[in-house]
Amino acid sequence: MIMPYTLVDNEEKKRYEFQLPEHIPHVEYIRTKDKIYLTHTEVPTELEGQGIGSELIKQALEDIDKKELTLVPLCPFVAHYIKEHPKWKELVLKGINIG
């Protein structure tokens, strides 16, 4: 059961995050003018297996799409998510093989 989570683009910490009462699952990024590199996804152990990581990546990709950025998925979790949800491949920098 995925609860409704609100994505926060924490530009100061350079990460997308869900601000939950006791935890802050997040995906770190490096942003250039027109590209965003998703470098690391972290979901606290207590929250694993609940779909939170996938929901976080989905909402982050929606934001990246809305901002018309080119995605460079350096995080293996992000690359796997895109492989499982091919519609997001259009965001990925051309020429990068994500598997």
Image (spheres, grey):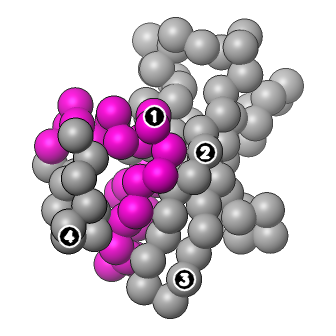
| Residue 10, placed above or below residue 3 | below
Q: Which residue is mark 1?
A: 77
Q: CA distance from mark 1 to mark 2?
A: 8 Å
Q: Which residue is mark 3?
A: 32
Q: Indicate the amino acid at tag 4.
A: Lys
Q: Indicate the amino acid at tag 3.
A: Thr
Q: Which residue is mark 4?
A: 94
Question: In the image, is residue 78 part of the stretch drawn in magenta?
Answer: yes
Residue range corresponding to the magenta coloring: 59-86
> Which of the two labelled residues, at mark 2 and mark 4, occupies the earlier sequence position?
2
- Residue count near mark 3 (Cα–Cα under 10 Å), binned few <14, some 14–19, many ≥20: few
Quadrant assignment for the C terminus: top left
Q: Left or right: 27 with respect to 56?
A: right
Which disc number belongs to residue 40? Answer: 2
Q: Is residue 8 visible?
A: no
| Residue 87, placed above or below residue 1 | below
